[in-house]
Image (cartoon, coloured by chain):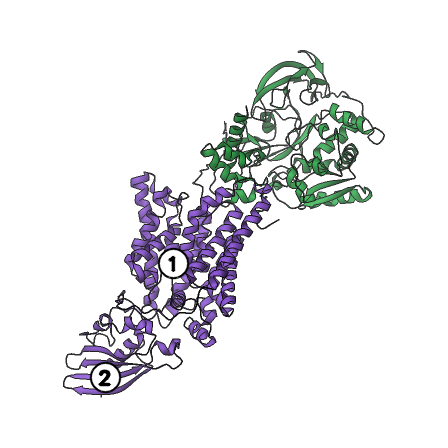
Amino acid sequence: MPLWIGPMNAHLNGHKELTSHNEIVTVKPKGEVYIPLSNGNNAAVEVLVKEGDKVKVGTLLAKRSVPFVVPIYSSVSGTVGVVKSMMHAVMRPCDHLVIVSDGKFEKAQSFSPIDYTSATRDELVDFIMNSGLMGCGGAGFPTYIKYKNPVNIHTLIINAVECEPYITADYRTMKEFLDDLIYGTKALLKASTAKEAIIAIKKNKVEVCTKIQALLANEPQIKLFMTPDKYPMGWERTLVYEFTHKRYDKLPSEIGVIVNNATTAIALAQSLKYGSAIDEKIITFSGDGLKHPVNVKVPYGTTVKEIVEAIGGYSAEDVLVIAGGPMMGKTIPTDNFVITSYSNAITILKTTPQEAIPCMRCGRCNDTCPAGLLPVRINNAEAVADLDLIVKLAADQCIECGMCSYICPSRIDVTEGVRRAKRALMLRKK
Amino acid sequence: MKFTFRVSPNYRQPLSTQWIMTELTLCIAVVLGYNVVYYYLNPNLGPEYAIHALSMIATSLVVAIGTEALWAKFYAKKPVLKYLTQSFPWVTALLFVGMMGVNKPLYVIIVGSLVSTLIGKLIFGGFGQNIFNPAGVGRAFSVLAFGGFIASQFPDVVTGATPNQVMESLGWVITKPEAVTAYLNQFNGLWGLFSGQYVGAIGETNTLLIMLVGLYLSVRKIIDWRVPVVFIASLFTFATIIMYFKGMGWWYPIFSISTGGAMFGAVFMLTDPVTSPTSIPGRIIFAIGVAFLATLIRVKGHLPEGVIRSILFMNMVTPLIDRGLDGWPLKAMKKYAFTIGTVFAVSLLTVSFTATTISYKEPYVPEDSIPNLGDPILFSTLPTAGNVNIVSTTVTGDITTFVIETKGHAYEAEWETDPKPNVIEVKINTVTKTIVSVTFVTYHDTASLQYATSHPVFLKQFDGLSIIVDNSVDVVIGATFTTDSVIRAVNAAIAAVLTPQ
């Protein structure tokens, strides 16, 4: 790193100890579950079942094909209800298919399992597409896209960094299914055509590191890569830079790297082995707004409200319900929204008063911005609606990781200012 | 149940601006505290200096906080206490007073602190909005308003000239080894200069301590370490160039980073976030710029204390620097490296060229200067004995005339290779117990300082003073460091009169 650029990351107090070692609680929905039919965008979706149909866990309910193919499977057994609009974890209402659970959780095989070692690469990628697997890192990007046309890929990075504070879902899922992690990694390695796979994990997770290391003894193609305990080490760009010391323009495949989340690898392994799509997920419910922070294992489509009640309720009258971690997760002004197949955490924090004071131009946001932007300058440009300057400052490169607001000692919502700048750019493009 | 909505992220680092300012305040207090203790323990100064320094600090604080409180109440119309805790007037007040010499009367502090806060900060819109470093504005204003009295920190009897002021009078070039030693000995040598073993501005003298404080602030991430490091390194480099061209020793670059508030500026003034650029390359360019301008002002300008002026100038171009570096830094690394390199190279070349144009100069002697009369508080603790020799005593009626030889500044600084004592005639009326007159018979101290000491305005003060008040003379202090020879002579004469035969 040259002298004239900041660290571009920072150590955060993760509060991971709240949920990293206590028992995983299984929560089964008692009545209705709501299967989100879109990802918050209004993509066309074809519903394949009718109201009144009986479904089982794993029954194909609907299919999206534009822009990407995403089949949607049921997470409970029971009766199909109506399509209903409700709040989604992306903080926009969208259509959900109601399934009234019969409480039996009978399973149906969604598709035939395959042996990835004997299948061709194309078969494997098609399998990933049909399993409806979406990246479990939080963005919900269909996994198969990355593997469609790999060109000159040399490294597959399995991202087990989990840098968001409070979240331990990946960690707990890994601990639970270590063998599946290796299995899924090997399958993705084949799909990626890369020569080696790297499992990237924070070096302070000693216990899991040791276990993975032992398992890797007879896996010459897979290596363990221990990263510093910094945020946002789990962001693709930061992680790829940490490992390769190279930067890329749009996608890591430009420099021969594919990145996938560890939970994604595990989910793939389970789909391959059992012929089932994701129906249950380990989700971290943490934060000081909960009486008992804990990881829960829950069918997706279950409402946050139901889960919170099942694990002991809120610890305060006024809370922030955040879909995801506190850095990137959105605050949802209700707890009546559901866990999606790619959710990993719900963070509940007590609402504490917070007041911004004037910016003192200290530039800490500039020094730590993981995208190497100048957030304070973007904020200034946005304040005077100087769109040309916003373009020059590359505001569109911001991923809203929240670092600038986090680091701001004056408690200014810097990230929100950059968001406004990005919106202004979008409006101009239209 | 209430589900509050708030934009993400909903996670904040523990370090707040309020805490940053608190730690910074404590650090400045440590630096000022050192000097107060130093004055207290120094046998030549004593408690009165320490008390005066404390009252300067208190005055500055009261004026700054009071001004902002009134502003909050009557202009901003906001709750006063809340306004103050988000505006941090005490930081400005402490920084301002830290740049003032201990011999400054309180009214200078009052005016300076008021200007710092009101003109330097509030009229721009308060904390975060000001263009110029508020403390620097107050300091610069004081220099202009109170003239040479403040600017040159003209020494009183005890405190002596500031290092840069003496350098200024010599054209910033001393090459003769014995002259260098003599010069540095005024400030207890290079180490004394570095570790604050002399009297100057009440926050600036102890370079070593400020360096340690800066280290602490950097580790705590209160300040960006790059700013002081780049500034001091640049200042050192530029001084090294001058040293090389003029054949001076390594003492010169060390001297140049140890005086003139260089370290104080580096740690506390350049790092003021409000008035410096927001990006790292910007801050580096800013620091190089200040070092460059300070070097030029020192060797070519006719004013000492170049650091403050340079900071104010660079404050002015801060928006320009910010604007110039706007872009996507990650994609502009090469451009940044090139810009920083160019700024440094141009500065280096300019300093090299300047170095060839400066030379040792004879001290400047004003024709008809009137000495400045300072504050009357700093006087009566002077040593009465030592280095005095009563050459003759003549009694004519009531009047006793003493001719007294006393070693003046020539002996301490030893500019002249052959120092001679000053010879002073003191006439005392032994009946009325008053001083009749004090005059110079011969003067042998530094020529540039003679005008002040031997000036009638200075010597006239003694006329008619009672000698039995507390067995020592108590007059308004004069304006140069040679005056102590006069005081000593007078005290010796009084002692001779009062001692029973």
Residue A350 lies, in percent from the top left, at 51, 35
Circle 1 marks a residue in which chain? B
* Foreground of the two, B36 or A19: B36
Q: Quadrant of residue A221?
A: top right
Residue B16 makes an appearance in the image? no
How dense is the environment of label 2, judged by Cα within 10 Å: few (below 14), some, or many (20 and up)?
Answer: many
Residue pictured at 49% horizontal, 36% vertical: A379
Circle 2 marks a residue in which chain? B
Residue A226 lies, in percent from the top left, at 69, 45
Query: Does residue A408 appear to the left or right of B89 in the view shown?
Result: right
Residue A351 lies, in percent from the top left, at 49, 34
Q: Quadrant of residue A216?
A: top right
Q: Quadrant of residue B345?
A: bottom right
Residue B239 makes an appearance in the image? yes
Q: In the figure, the purple chain has which letter?
A: B
Query: Is B262 located above or below residue A251 in the figure?
Result: below
Query: Does residue A176 appear to the left or right of A430 in the view shown?
Result: right
Q: In the figure, the green chain has which letter?
A: A
Query: Does residue A379 appear to the left or right of A343 in the view shown?
Result: left
* Foreground of the two, A344 or B422: B422
The extreme right residue here reads A118
Amino acid at dot 1: Met
Q: Label 2, on which residue?
A: B402
Q: Secondary structure at mark 1?
A: loop
Query: Is A177 located above or below residue B247 in the figure?
Result: above
* Foreground of the two, A165 or A120: A120
Q: Label 1, on which residue?
A: B99
How dense is the environment of label 1, judged by Cα within 10 Å: few (below 14), some, or many (20 and up)?
Answer: many
